[in-house]
Image: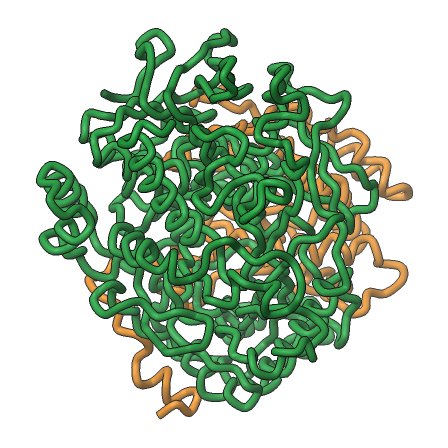
Chain colours: A green, B orange
Amino acid sequence: MPVITPDTLQDSYDVVIVGSGAGGGQTAYTLTMEGVKVLLLEAGRSFDVQSEAAMLQWPSQAPLRGERTPDKQYGFHDCSIHSGWEIPGEPYTNANADPGSQFKWWRQRMMGGRTNHWGRISLRNGPFDFKPHTRWGLGFDWPIGYDDLAPYYDKVEMLIGVFGTSEGIENSPDSPPGVLLPAPKLRVGELYARKHGARAGARIVSIHRAVLTQPQDAEGIPQKLHPGNAKAQRILRESMATRAPCFWATDCHRGCAIRANYDSQTVHLRPALQTGNLDILPNAMVREVTVGKDGKATGVTFIDKTTGREGHARGRAVVLAASAMESVRLLLNSTSNLFPQGLANSSGKVGKYITDSVSSSLGAHIPAFEGMPVHNEDGAGPHAYVPWTRHAQNRKGAFGFPGGYHLEFTTGRQMPSLQVVSGIDSRAGSATVLFGRKLREEARRFYGAQLGFGAQGTMLPNDDCYTELDPVLKDQWGIPVLRFHWKWSDFELNQVRHQQAHIRELLEALGGKVSGKADPDPRDAIRQGGTVIHEVGGAIMGHDPASSVSNPWSQAWDVKNLFFADGAPFASTADKNPTLTIMALAWRMADHLLSELKHQNL
Amino acid sequence: MAKPDPLPRISRRASLQWMLGATAALATPEASLHAAPPPTAKGYGPDPSMVTLYKPGDVWPLTLSEPQRRTTRALCDLILPADETSPAASALGVPDFIDEWISSPYPAQAADRPLLLEGLAWLDEDAVRRCGKPFADLTAGQQEAIANDLATLPPAPEHKRAAAFFKRFRDLTAGGYYTTPEGSRTLGYVGNLPLASFEGPPPEALRHVGLI
């Protein structure tokens, strides 16, 4: 079974998956390794990271030195095609005209989805993150806890390969011994921040990222992940053997032709194809989930983007992994006599409770770094971060917001971008726009002397952040589009105020000269909703079918053979990046789906 | 991706006409830019080959006239001249990059086009007024004198627009320079090289910031 066209679609599959990213990839992997016949549909084209990712190209080898354009919205060499906030022919709308109350929606129409340019930061949600209502009296408790997901975090980390250390930090869980790969050495800026940041209460430790720092244990891990399944062990062993460890150059966002970092195709879809149990249909824009008279899903209707023709794929079960908002859109567009409000929406909660990471950033010039001895510190993306360690102080909400935030670094002598001398005149205290010999000297002196932190924090669901179908607008295939509603609550704004003050304090503890004014209006400092690309929710899991869309197994309450494998079931956003949790939830869901198939429960 | 058409640059005859026009427009410097046609080319689309090694002009035509290119080259090399260890900006293709930038069909660069074209014309007009020759034909000292007038911070009121041009041109020149492999090395960037291991900072870097 291979990458196919609509003409070679089989009559029926055990499971039809919509979306090829982290969740769809993990689901396809787990199911096909156990012999389940799977069809995976992807709206974008096939993409070969080995031959198409620009790893070592210089900015000067790209148009406009690789700067962002409307065609390549993260820059020319970013591993994204047919992607962006605005995609021609695929609009969405916002109910509110105020940009501060709008949601921006990143779509990535290519095989592997957003995993192609993902930052690879792989932090586990902690116990508190699953129980915000218990802890804060706010939002909803997830119907599962950390202990339910911990074994799946272990498995995902072993499968995809995650470097990091175990630090014993409250609510930032350790991994069991032998699971993580060794963390890379810290850079000079990271070490400097670790020493001096302590004065500002920041504890700086190795971050966890899905990058191989050494070859995976291709003998041991397959046995642990697939006990008693010799075929799966062999396939995984062979797959792991094709992955090289990081060669300590190039930005992971460019994609990794040597397969050192995780993307869905490298880790999930290649071995899944090797099982012979997977068909992949690219260029298939799914329009709706079809339902039989018995109220069960029968498959999906899709548009073949290469011909414009509509097709239908049948399955005994359907898994939505199209990205949280796209899966919501599919549900709302799947109306029938049985489901007039959209599929799986008897609660009226489909599209409700969207959250994104609460984020702001601040940078500084660090005089101590000026004139740094020349050395290569490309490394493997960020090596360190600042976890949230103030649970005790904020236990009763003294900070004015629930949860917390972690800080990610931008530091180092990175590959210069077009903006490399930005701000140089004022930094040098120059009374002129520098040019000539003086420009060269100052550019060299200040290169790499910047350090910044970006915060990413908890967002609990509220009634004002949701999506629905736009009553009028349709996309180029005639499919109704989403209309977003977005409004920050005081909790997010208070958190951003705290982030800004804390980052400033931290930068000043490093002797930094901070750019930007003190105590900015949090409405200006906060990153717009959706722009962190961590949006989750819209089909949240819960204990009660009246107030949630999916059950604790990411299975729709209303349609027992319909499942979710993306961020849609998240009942809130933790201060951790969501992708690792998407994969762990998808694996857990897929195990449940296997069991339901086996017991003929679907 | 389809191979783009070869890019005819503006003919010598048209260039001469432009030069005459620019000189004639001394009294009303902004008149000259209205002669510059806005780019009508297409961008690279949402699915370009990322691994291809591009150079300016490969995707959309370059549009600077020969006199404009001469001025661009001269100003680039005034901003980053060659020294004992580093090549000049023109040796690293920076003028081509500036041309690519102002010829770009994308909105962010298109917004820079009037300022940059106007500024190039202004430079030549100022050079002709001061020394009777276009900017590129002046001595280094003469060029520097003109640039010094534009480089003052904050800019003199009579030079506000030309100073904005100079600052933008400087930023593009420096950015265009340091984003080349050779230019980045002169800045002290020594990465983008596959390595067998990552050893962390060397002792001299740790000593530099007092960590050892």
A340 or A80: nearer the viewer: A340
Please state which of residues A42 and A361 is positioned toward the viewer in this rendering.
Answer: A42
Judging depth in this view, the residue of A224 and A410 nearest the camera is A224
Q: Residue A427 in the image: x percent, y percent?
A: 64, 75
- For image coordinates 66% across by 71% down, the residue present is A425
Counting from the top left corner in percent of width and height, residue A319 is at 43, 31
Q: With respect to residue A189, does A543 lie above or below? A: above
Q: At which x and y percent is residue A240?
A: 18, 47
Tell me the quarter of the image containing the C terminus of chain A.
Answer: top left
Q: Look at 41% across and 43% down and name the residue there.
A: A115
The percent coordinates of residue B112 (x first, y second) are 71, 43
Between residues A545 and A344, which one lies in front from this camera angle?
A545
User: Residue at position x 46%, y 67% from top?
Assistant: A127
Q: Is residue A516 above or below residue A351?
A: below
Residue B67 visible in this rendered orientation of the protein:
no
Quadrant location of residue A213? Answer: bottom left
Question: Is B118 displayed left or right of B59 in the figure?
Answer: right
Report the quarter where the N terminus of chain A lies. top left
A578 relative to A3 in the view: left or right: right
Could you say which quadrant of the image residue A358 lies in? bottom right
Side of B152 relative to A322 (left or right): right
Q: Residue at x 46, y 42 (%)?
A: A554
| Residue A75 seen | yes
How many numbered badges does the structure rendering display?
A: 0
